Image (cartoon, rainbow, N blue to C red):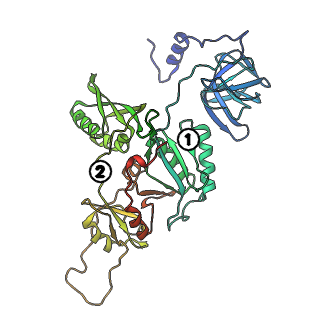
Amino acid sequence: GQKANGNMVPLLDAILDRVPPPRGQREGAPFSMLVTQLEANPYLGKCALGRVTSGIVSVGDSIRVLAPETGDVIEAGKVTKLFLRSGVQQIEMAQAGAGDLVAISGVPKVGVNSTIASPDVTTPLEFIPIDPPTISVTFSVNDSPLAGREGTMLTSNMIRDRLLREAETNVALQIVSDGKSESMEVRGRGELQLSVLIETMRREGFELSVTPPRVLFKRDPENPKFALEPYEEITVDVDHDVSGNVIEKLTKRKGELKSFVDVADKARIVFHIPTRGLLGYASEFKNDTHGTGVMNHAFLHYGEYAGAFEKTRKSSMICMAQGTATSYALNMVEARGRLFVRNGDDVYSGMVVGELSKDGTDLDVNPTKAKQLTNVRAAGKDETIRLTPVKPWSLEAVIAYINPDEAIEVTPSQIRLRKQILDPTRRKQNSRKRISDISHFID
């Protein structure tokens, strides 16, 4: 009932008065803690964060790491450092007890949902399982003709070290390497998580080549001939006047309507949909709801393969020469469709420079062709060329747009779309091998 007076003190006082203190026996009980987060410290290595469930722990105490569910001992060690979390600060402590939020160093093999406990504890603590990764992309060295002009982190070793460092603390991320090629497969929970990682790396000076997102299929354990794909439960809150459009779009993406209820002045719609159906849908959803809709989705289960999707993207205009795009050439190319490059942009053979207005096969174009200079004047020779403005790519948009045979070239200041195989002869030979969407990846 108090007035705020421009600060949060009344709310914090109410929390102290009404929220019960953490449960847990501090005295006379063995130490145990469930790890909920990991933190990389440049001086101490990996630190495990969590709330002490029972007992007291001190610097120098012997501890063991127990695996989730099974309780197998992953590692044994000693507490080398102990930090207490107080707000956003970390305070170094000699001892902590039940109810304290702490960070412990000394067990580098610890993982999220593991139990850190005294040597006499053998049963792991209950935990909430982490949703498995459902999509993957492949990170590799930028091998385009324009590589190395902007970035400082260019080699495969630099990319590998950065990804492994990210996987130490980002628990929903998995890094897979076959040990033969220089590329690294990165598995995550969705397009947003992967695009945030790519954006962070490009700001750090990395240059990358990234393949389109692929859904992680699994073999049916009862019948290995059949594949299972991940399904998600998607909940959307939208205005009633656009709910029909949202239902139509999700149904086309193999979604199954589970419920439709009114919540205040919004319609709450729940669908069960294959993860493949959500790839690229976020930007459509924003446009359909004019930015007023709210969408949440969570992993549901692995289910029966839902079949191939309708092709929604038209064919591409592929650059056939290296150089600088000219307004003279772009003016002629623009009649064929939508352009992705502007006058003065650097282009190269195999780069995607536009989208055709008609579907069919990809078209090779030359956006670098210059106007021939002669001393002969002709009618209409000096007409002003007006090109349609080009909207720069965002990472989310290009990840949603890209075709399976294309790749994203990411540099600190540029995002370009290109074919994975730049050589036109090899590309045509490879295009004869038809690949279904289910063969992208089967775990």
Task: Note whether residue 347 is visible.
Answer: no
Label 1 sits on residue: 174
Q: Provide the secondary structure element on which disc 2 rests.
A: loop
**Residue 108 or 81: which is nearer the viewer?**
108
Residue drawn where x is 26% and y is 90% of the image: 376
Residue drawn where x is 68% and y is 19% of the image: 32
Q: Quadrant of the N terminus?
A: top left
**Residue type marked 2:** Lys
Q: Is residue 350 above or below residue 194?
A: below
Q: Is residue 403 above or below residue 116?
A: below
From the top left corner, tell me how far across and down residue 63 is, in percent: 74, 24
Q: Residue furthest right?
A: 60
Q: Are marks 2 and 1 in contact (CB under 8 Å)?
A: no
Q: Provide the secondary structure element on which disc 1 rests.
A: strand
**Residue type marked 1:** Gln
* Nearest to N terminus: mark 2 or mark 1: 1
Q: Estimate how packed mark 2 is, as few (under 14), some (14 to 19) or many (20 or more) residues with alpha carbons within 10 Å.
A: few
User: To which quarter of the image does residue 404 belong?
Assistant: bottom left
Q: Residue furthest left?
A: 379
Residue drawn where x is 44% and y is 47% of the image: 213
Label 2, label 1: how far apart the Cα atoms are: 29 Å
Q: Residue furthest bottom?
A: 375
Label 2 sits on residue: 311
From the top left corner, tell me how far across and down residue 230 is, in percent: 42, 36
From the top left corner, tell me how far across and down residue 304 is, in percent: 37, 35
* Side (left or right) of 75 relative to 422: right
